[in-house]
Amino acid sequence: SHPLDLRLPTPGCFADPERAGLDADAVFDGMTEHLFFTLGKLAPTASNHDLYMALSYAVRDRLMTRYLASLEAIRARPHKTVAYLSAEFLIGPQLNSNLLNLGISKDIAEQALRRFRIESLDQILEVEEEPGLGNGGLGRLAACYMESLASLQVPAIGYGIRYEFGIFNQLIRDGWQVEVTDKWLKGGWPWELPQPEEACFVGFGGRTESYTDGKGNYRSRWIPSEHAIGIPHDVPVLGYRVNTCNRLRLWRADATESFDFYAFNIGDYYGAVEEKVGSETLSKVLYPNDGTDEGRRLRLKQQHFFVSCSLQDMLRSLGNRGIPIEEFPNHWTVQLNDTHPAIAVAELMRLLIDEHYLDWDTAWDITTRSVAYTNHTLLPEALEKWDLTRFRSLLPRHLELIYEINRRFLQQVRLRYPGNDAIQRKLSIIDEDGGKAVRMANLATIAAHHVNGVAALHSDLLKRQLMPEFAEIWPEKFTNVTNGVTPRRWVALANPALSRLLDEHVGPEWITNMELLTKLEERQHDTAFLEQWGATKLSVKRKLAGYIHRQTGVLVDPSSLFDVQVKRIHEYKRQHLNALQVITHYLRIKNGQAEGMAPRTVIFGGKAAPGYYMAKLIIRFINGIAETINADPDMEGRLRVVFLPDYNVKLAEQIYPASDLSEQVSTAGKEASGTGNMKFAMNGALTIGTLDGANVEIRERVGPENFFLFGKTETEIMELQTNGYRPRQIVETLPELAEALRLIGLGHFSNGDGELFRPLLDNLTGFDPFFVLADFADYLRAQDEVNQAWTNRKQWNRMSLLNTARTGFFSSDRSIQDYCQTIWKAEPFPVEITCDVP
Ligand code: GL2
C-alpha cells in the first residue's frame, strides 16, 4: 500500500523529467491527492471515471507552471499575440494529448495506473467525454491551429463560446438518425479554469442617441435594453514538448441580475425572470448546421456575445499593461474564422469610438490593421446574411457604424467605377435585393487586411468567382493558406503503431517536422519494410474491426479493403454517389460478374443537420443498403457495409489509421478544402477523389500515380450547368446505374417500401444538383482501378508509404507558419522556466 504523500508536485522544465514531476511516482502521488482531496474518493472504491478525473487533474497540475509562465512572459515583455476568433473549437479529448505534449509516456501513465489496478491507459481514456463544441472541419481546424500555435511557441489565444450542449450525439434507430442532447459537462470537465473576476458585460437591443461631448464633438451612444455577462472559462493549450502553453478562452453567458427587483415589485414576476432566462440561454447550445446559415436571431446574439467579450478582453489587457490603445495592431492580430465573428469589425469600431473616444479615422486604421478574414466556403447557402430589421433591433449602434463603413467604401467604389450601379449593388454591405440584409462576408472583406481561402483551388475560386470585384480593387488583400492538421493528434496519438515505425525509420523528429517523412521514400522498394508497413496497417484494422463489431454487431474481415467515407452528411459531399457504387458492386457479385473483385468493407460515418431532410434520408439510404447486403449470404466474405454512429473526434482517431481507401468525392468546386483527406493520406490511405479542395494539392504531392482521380473538373461542371444538364439521359446510357435505381425504386433496400427513397431518386434523376450521375461512370472506372491496385499488395503498400512520406506539407505547423509570415506578422516567443525544486 502507498501512504498519502502530501508534498506538492513540482512541475518544471523538460531538462530533467524526474525533477519536473513527470515520473510515475509523481503522477501516482498527484492522482492520490486528487482522488482524496478534490474528488473525495478512496482509492479502493474509485471508478474508472474517478481515476480519469484524478489523472486529468494530476496532468493539469503539471501544465500550470508552463501556463502561468506563458501568460507572465507576455505580460512582462509584450509580444504580438494571435487572437483566433471562432464560433467553434472542436478540441476533442484532452487527457492523451496533454500527456503526449508534456512528455508523460503511456508507460509512465500505466505504471501509475497499475497501482490503482488499472492495466491500460486506454481503459481510462475511454471514459473521457469530448467537448463537441463544433460541427466539423471548420471547428476541428481551429483546434489543430491552436495546438500548432503552441507547439511553434507563438503567443496566441483562442476566443469562442463554451456551449453547455455541443453537437448532438447521434443514434441510429431503424436506420434513421436520432439526435440526443450532448451533456458533455455532466461528469465534470477537469480541463477548464473559470475566471469569474474577468467577466465582461455585453449589451443587446435598445436604441442609440446622439449627444455633444464636452469638447463640442457630435457623438453617438448606445443604450441597450438587455445585458449578458460573459464568464471566461480557460482551457490550457500546451505545445509539444515546449514551455509555451496558450489559452483557449471560452465565454459562458450568465444573466446580469439574478432578479429584476423593480419588475418583481410591480408584480411582473415572469417579466423579471425573462431577462435572466434570455441571457442564460445564450451559450446554451451550438447550432448544429455545418456550412449552412439559418439566420436565427439567437445565433447573431451568440456571435455578438463572444466577439464583444473577446475584444473587450483584448483592450483590457492593453490597459492592464499600460499600452496605449493606438498600439492595438502591434499587439493583437485578430483572425476571423469565417464570418461567424465578423461582427468584430463593427464592435471594435464601437468600442474604440464610443467607449475609448477615438475619432473615426484612427479607429478605422486600428481595425483594418488588426483584422483578417478566412473564408471557408463558396456555397451561397453558407454566406451569412442578417435580415436588416432583425439586425437593427438587436444591434442598432452596430448598424449605424456599418452604414458609415459602407458609405465611405461605396464612395471609393463610385470613384473607381463611375456610373456602375451594378458593382455598387454587388459590393455593398447591405443587400438591397428582396428583403434587405447585412452581408457579413462583405463587411469582413472590406475591413480585413487579408482575406484568405483554405486551399489553392478554393482561394482561386474565391478571387475569380465569389469576389472578383473586391479582388480587382484590392489584389494584394487576397491570399491562400492551405489547411493543415496536427500530426500530434492525427498521427502520434491516433496511430501509435505507425508512429513507432516512423520513429525507427525516420527518427522521432518527424513529429515536429513532417517534411522529414520523405526519408521513407528510401524504403519504397524494400520488400521486408513494405510487408512491415502492411502488417502495421492490418494491426490497426483489427482494432477497428473489434469496435465495429461491438457497436453495430457486424463482423468485418480486417484483411478486406477498408473503404471509408467519414465527414458531415451533405449532398455536395456525395455520400449517395458512394452508396450507388456500393449497390453496383453488390449487383456485380449477385450477377456473377465479380471475378477478381477483392473483399471490401465500406464504412460510413457522419452527422446530418437535424433540419436537413435530404441528408437524413441519405443516412437512411446507407443503412438500408447495409442491412440488405450484410444479411445476404452471397455477400459473405466479399462485401460488408457499415454506418458507424456518432462520428466525432474520438471515433475519428480510430478510423483514419485503419483506412485503406479515403473517399473524397465532392462535386468539384464545392469542398473548400477538406481536412479529413489529409488525415487519411498521412496515415497511409490512398485517395479516390475529385479535383476539389485540397485533393488537388494532395494529388500533386503524392503523385498522380498514387491517387485515384475521377470526375468532372470545376470548369466542366460549370459548363454542364450552363449548357443544360439532363441526368435522365445519363441513366439511359448506363445499364448498371439504371438497374441500381430500379432496385431502389422497388424497395429492395427498404424492405419492399418503394416510396421511402423516392425523394432521393427524384432528386437524382430530376435535377441532380450535385452532378452525382454525371460523375458516376468515371467513379466506377476509378473504383475498378482501386480494385486492381489492391490485388497487388506490395504495390499498394508502396503507394500507401508514399502517401505518408509526401504529405508532410499538410501539417498544421506549415499552415500556421504561412499565417504567421504572410498575414499575422507574428513570431515565436520561447518561454523560459527555471527549474527550482524547493
Ligand atoms: C468548411 C469547409 O466546408 C471544409 O472544406 C474546410 O476544410 C473547413 C475548414 O477550412 O471549412 N467550411 C465550413 O463552413 N465548414 C467546413 O468544414 N463547416
Image (spheres, grey):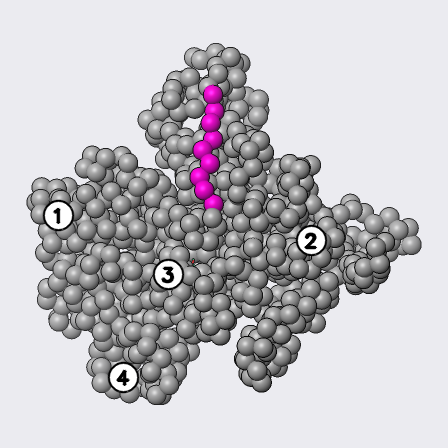
**Which comes before the other along the chain, label 3 or label 4?**
3
Residue pointed to by mark 2: 352
Q: Residue at x 20, y 66 (%)?
A: 783
Disc 4 crowd rating (10 Å Cα; few below 14, some 14-19, many 20+) is some
Hey, what amino acid is under mark 3? Answer: Ala
Secondary element at image label 1: loop
> Which of the two residues, 814 or 759, is positioned nearer the viewer here?
814
Which label was assigned to residue 524? 1
**Which comes before the other along the chain, label 1 or label 2?**
2
> Which of the two residues, 312 or 657, is positioned nearer the viewer here?
312
Residue pointed to by mark 4: 730
**Which comes before the other along the chain, label 2 or label 4?**
2
Task: Give the Cα separation between the discs numbered 1 and 2.
Answer: 59 Å
Q: Residue at x 47, y 63 (%)?
A: 477
Disc 2 vs disc 4: Cβ atoms closer than 8 Å?
no
Disc 1 vs disc 2: Cβ atoms closer than 8 Å?
no
Residue pointed to by mark 3: 455
Q: Residue at x 53, y 31 (%)?
A: 73
Give yes or no for residue 833 being in the magenta stretch: yes
Q: Is residue 770 above or below residue 191?
A: below
**Which comes before the other along the chain, label 4 or label 1?**
1
Disc 1 vs disc 3: Cβ atoms closer than 8 Å?
no
Task: Give the Cα separation between the discs numbered 1 and 3.
Answer: 29 Å
Q: Which residues are magenta?
A: 826-834
Hey, what amino acid is under mark 4? Answer: Ile
Hey, what amino acid is under mark 1? Answer: Gln
Hey, what amino acid is under mark 2? Answer: Leu
Q: Position of residue 270 (x, y in %)?
A: 81, 56
Question: Would you say 493 lies left or right of 39 here?
Answer: left
Disc 2 or disc 4, which is closer to the eye? Answer: 2
